[in-house]
Amino acid sequence: MTARPVRASPAADPLWEESLRLFPGGVNSPVRAFRAVGGRPLILTSGRGATVTDVRGDTYLDFIGSWGALILGHAPADVVAAVSAAAQRGMSFGMPTAAEPQLAGLIQSAFPSIERMRFVSSGTEAAMSAMRLARGATGRPRIVKFAGCYHGHSDALLARAGSGVTTLGLPGSAGVTPGAAADTVVLPYNDLTAVRKAFADHGPTIAAVIVEPVAANMGVVSPRPGFLEGLRAVTREAGSLLIFDEVITGFRIAFGGVQGLTGIRPDLTCLGKIAGGGLPLAVYGGRADLMGALAPEGPVYQAGTLSGNPVAVAAGTATLRRLQTGEVYALLEARAALLEAGLIRAAAEAGAICRVVRASSMLTVFFTPEVPQDLAAAERADTERFGRFFRAMLRRGILIPPSQFEAWFVSVAHEPDDISRTVAAASEAFREAA
Ligand SMILES: *Cc1c(COP(=O)(O)O)cnc(C)c1O
């Protein structure tokens, strides 16, 4: 792409003023508001490959990728064709379609632990429903989650959540009653000792442990060796369920997610983002006996007017067909490794105190001296410095997530030239942010 100079924000921007009047913070999801980095968000009109264009006609190299959903880049021709063909056949039926088992088959080929599944419309719904199912199937009330892991914005799972809750420095959320969160036990990520203690104290009342098997919503934080295996062993022993929230990591870390790489088989799994190929679709599923507890076969209720929406199913199916070949992951690994190495070099040359943490094609530049193992360590990052770095990158036409506590996503559309340009911009941005 041709790099265009990015204009400074004009004093008045009628479209943004109107957005601020209409939407709280001017946005329909909080992190988009740029509150953590200053300035006002881009208002986008289009995306193509690795770039997005805003209403002023400025083009940016994009590392948000709809928060990880767009692993093939913006508007890939095959996915767009599948979506428009599906839309022409009908936008929604509220009845089963032949396309649903097709997508389910692709998902199963990637995630053998998902013996049966349900399609829903967001990751929030997937995690909320998996939690309800876990409680319904075990007859136990408590859920263990980890600080900094984000499982959507359902009441019980907002406690010490990552993503926007961390970005905005919120303890949780107003409007969540103590009762709604009372059965949520929040522990530090990577702390198996704390998990064992929680089980010693409450074991027979714990329905499930829900975890991001590689955390990406406090910035990228990888599990310590043995952490996930430990969770599997402790939950199995206590008769509790293990839920992998692979909404970000599914089809990202590998086609089969973290469970495919590690061989750890969770009882239930949540998928989203890539699974819907940029349209609203998410999935939860797992052991057949557990899924049989869902209505109408069993007593646990869950439903959705737009669940399994045919247009979203078409986007997901077209996306997963491309990913299924496996070649995509070798390419993503190469591109992301190039970016990681370039950023490390640029930071060292600029004398910046930071750590680049990468898990396959997602990474975070933490402005801290140590690689974070949990939320407390991630929160020691210098967010002011991150804000200066973010703005310096944006001025150079590079859009990274507007928060220290989010991951950058590399897509197959990021060419080696794009990576070089990003590293060159980062060299200057690290100096400017110092
Ligand atoms: C994005 C995300 C969710 C929430 O998904 P939405 O579609 O935004 O509701 C849940 N869990 C994880 C791990 C996520 O990254």
Image: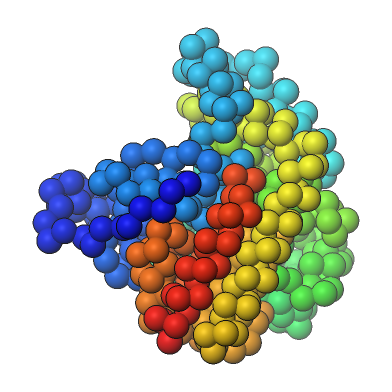
- The location of residue 201, given as percent across then percent down, is 71, 79
Q: Position of residue 95 (x, y in %)?
A: 56, 16
| Residue 388, above or below 126 | below
- Outermost residue to the front: 2
Residue 414 higher or lower than 293, as above or below: below
Q: Residue at x 45, y 76 (%)?
A: 428
Number of dots carrying numbers:
0
Position above or below: 95 against 159: above
Residue 318 sits in quarter = top right
Quadrant in which residue 192 is drawn? bottom right
> Looking at the image, is 321 positioned above or below residue 417?
above
Residue lying furthest top: 89
Does residue 194 appear in this view? yes
The picture quadrant where one finds residue 55 is: top left
What residue appears at the point 84 percent right and 67 percent down from the top-left corner? 229
Q: Nearer the viewer, residue 401 or 120?
A: 401
The one of 276 and 181 positioned closer to us in this rendering: 276
Residue at 72% over, 23% down: 101
> Can residue 126 be seen from the camera position used here?
no
Residue 295 on image: x %, y %: 64, 31
Q: Nearer the viewer, residue 135 or 173?
A: 173
Residue 276 pos. (x, y %): 58, 36
Specify the quadrant that holds the C terminus: bottom left
Name the colour scheme.
Answer: rainbow
Q: Is residue 351 left or right of residue 224?
A: left
Residue name at image x 66 percent, y 42 percent: 284
> Foreground residue, 172 or 56?
56
